[in-house]
Amino acid sequence: MIRLLILSVCVSTVMSTTLRAEDHPSQKPTGLLRHAVFFSFKDSSSKEDVQKVVDTFAALPDKIDSIVDFQYGVNNSPEGLDEGFTHCFLLSFKDEAGRAKYLPHPAHKEFGNVLRPHMEKVFVIDYWGDPKQPKVDEPLLHAVFFAFKEDASKEGVQKVEEAFAALPSKIDGINAFEWGINNSPERHDNGFTHCFLVSFESENARKNYLPHPDHQAFVGVLKPVLDKVRVLDFWGKRP
């Protein structure tokens, strides 16, 4: 599962490509709008090229005032479910208007020019997060994304949402958790609909979490309705 949790995690309901956040009663536009972005880079790009991309992205909060939080890091998940994505970024906006200001902003466009020659793949998921979660300076974030089978029932997906959301009360070491359903307008979601963000206090906490009996029981609830999963973990530092 993914551990990317900056202060929370996301989840949803229903089927892959047709699921909409606004159709889910828990996904009203309140809280903080999370913008989770992941890149893989071309083999031809040097470490310096990649670092320039990272530095240019991390400079955007000083140039675009609608970004209210920004965390980033390099994937360190031990699960092997990252599909080649290496660099992780989690931006937060107060509302959709903040995102609408960010996407066409000249500074964001300039960043795109720096990124484009080096980007191999991009993955973007937006969801409504939970601002009431604890805010840790540099948490180990575990970001988990699901796409569900087309024949998965609403009830089956809801069981997954509820089972995942119950884990923080069962497994020690989880600092924060939130989940949401993708509402990104950018069409870079690769068919994933649900995002869960878990924050750990340490690598040992993650090490305890993965084989924990309650986590394994959750996997048993998930498997019958799961189409695909993607997981990325990173230490969420701030600029």
Image (spheres, rainbow, N blue to C red):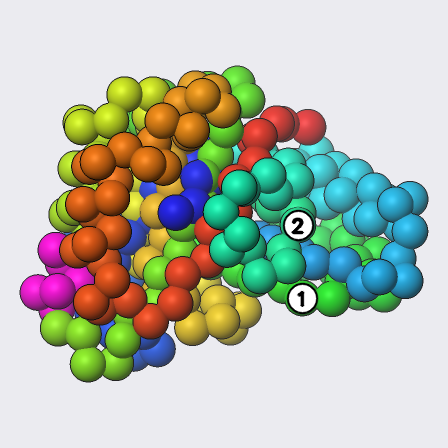
- Seen in the picture, residue 167 relative to 151 is either above or below; the reply is above
Write the start and end of the magenta stretch as one range. 154-160
Whichever of labels 2 and 1 marks the residue nearer the N terminus, that label is 2
Alpha-carbon span between mark 2 and mark 1: 10 Å
Residue 45 drawn at (x, y percent): 88, 57
Circle 2 is placed at which residue position? Answer: 86
Residue 100 can be seen, yes or no: no
Which quadrant holds residue 38? bottom right
Q: Position of residue 134 (x, y in %)?
A: 35, 21
Residue depicted at x 46% and y 58%: 230
| Residue 156 within the magenta-colored segment of the rendering | yes
What residue sits 88% from the left and 45% below the top?
47
Image: 156 above or below 161:
below
Of the residues shown, which amino acid type is indicated by label 2? Thr
Label 2: how many Cα within 10 Å (few below 14, some 14–19, many 20+)? some
Residue 206 part of the magenta segment: no
| Image vertical order of residue 43 relative to residue 161, above or below | below
Q: Position of residue 101 (x, y in %)?
A: 57, 54
Residue depicted at 24% across the width and 44% down the height: 216
Residue at (17%, 63%) from the top-left corner? 157
Which secondary structure class fits the magenta region best? helix
Q: Nearer the viewer, mark 2 or mark 1?
A: 2
The residue pinned by badge 1 equals: 121
